[in-house]
Image: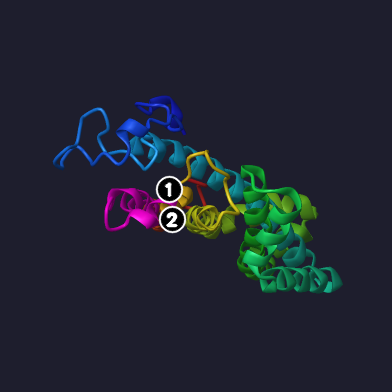
């Protein structure tokens, strides 16, 4: 969240005289650049922290945006049923069948690469996973005795969904959200690596990997550190999802 604030240097400042400095633990390294510098003399640690901020913003926006759309579609299709369910389910299947990379190329080709366009692409590609999984949960809950009794006693659809359905799908929703955190990090990095994500000179782990691949044998730290950051972030999000699934209690909503 605070990557650019706590970064020791400006992540975009070019200093060619300090280009390709190794990390501090190698010969020629300096405490001024703990993780070394890139081919333009920019501090690698500062760019990693700035890239973490970009990844956090993308993940947060994608999880919230895709989650809202997916939950709305899942609850509407699963609880209402009938023809509306059939239409929404087919729309979900069609969206999942559309190639993610082709969607990204179309949007970026029409509007240009930007952080906002990356978020839009990932939201459009991510909501069907929520809709597909949560719809089954909603259908299962709709047939449970406690939901049937609430409706027999006069409880409206909105009230039944808010007080009985949503709390009972929260555990699944938390797991899906944390899994999508990792997916969004990798997808953003992949798009930036291909040149259709966050545009330079903005720091992004994908951009750093794309720039560093040419120096894999001469400056191994350039592609290695952003790759490690991507891997650790995905691992952390998956472990957090497992922990939330195991500890969330739908009866107390905690």
Please state if 227 lies on the left or on the right of 202 as rendered: left
**Residue 93 part of the magenta segment:** no
Residue drawn at x 80%, y 53% as measured from the top left: 156
Secondary structure mostly taken by the magenta-highlighted segment of the chain: helix
Return the x and y of residue 132 as percentages of the image width and height: 65, 68
Return the x and y of residue 215 as percentages of the image width and height: 33, 54
Relative to 205, is 89 above or below? below
Q: Which mark is residue 208?
A: 1
Q: Is mark 2 on a helix, strand or loop?
A: helix
Relative to 238, is 132 above or below? below
Tell me the distance, in whole angstroms, between the alpha carbons under discs 1 and 2.
Answer: 28 Å
**Whether residue 141 is visible:** no
Q: Which of marks 1 and 2 is nearer the N terminus?
A: 1
Return the x and y of residue 167 as percentages of the image width and height: 59, 52
Q: Which contiguous range is marked in magenta?
A: 211-232
Q: How crowded is mark 2: few (under 14 residues within 10 Å), some or many (20 or more)?
A: many
Q: What element carries label 1?
A: helix
Please state if 222 lies on the left or on the right of 13 as rendered: left
Residue drawn at x 56%, y 54% as measured from the top left: 195
Q: Mark 2 points at which residue?
A: 241
**Whether residue 252 is visible:** yes
Snapshot quadrant of residue 102: bottom right
């Amino acid at each position: 969240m605070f990557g650019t604030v706590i970064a020791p240097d400006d992540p975009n400042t070019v200093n060619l005289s300090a280009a390709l400095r190794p990390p501090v633990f190698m010969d020629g390294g300096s405490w001024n650049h703990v993780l070394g510098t890139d081919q333009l003399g920019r501090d690698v640690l500062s760019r990693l922290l700035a890239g973490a901020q970009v990844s956090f913003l993308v993940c947060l926006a994608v999880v919230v945006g895709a989650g809202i759309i997916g939950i709305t579609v899942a609850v509407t299709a699963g609880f209402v049923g009938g023809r509306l369910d059939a239409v929404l389910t087919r729309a979900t299947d069609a969206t999942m069948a559309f190639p993610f990379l082709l969607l990204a190329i179309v949007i970026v080709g029409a509007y240009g690469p930007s952080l906002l366009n990356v978020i839009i692409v990932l939201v459009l590609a991510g909501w069907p996973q929520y809709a597909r999984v949560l719809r089954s949960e909603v259908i299962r809950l709709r047939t449970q005795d406690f939901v049937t009794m609430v409706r027999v006693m006069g409880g409206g659809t909105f009230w039944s969904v808010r007080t009985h359905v949503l709390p009972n799908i929260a555990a699944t929703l938390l797991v899906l959200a944390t899994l999508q955190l990792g997916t969004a990090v990798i997808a953003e990095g992949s798009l930036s690596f291909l040149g259709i994500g966050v545009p330079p000179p903005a720091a992004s782990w994908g951009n750093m990997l794309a720039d560093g691949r040419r120096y894999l044998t001469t400056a191994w730290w350039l592609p290695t550190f952003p790759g490690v950051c991507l891997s650790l972030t995905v691992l952390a999000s998956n472990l957090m999802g497992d922990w939330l699934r195991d500890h969330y209690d739908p009866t107390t909503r905690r």
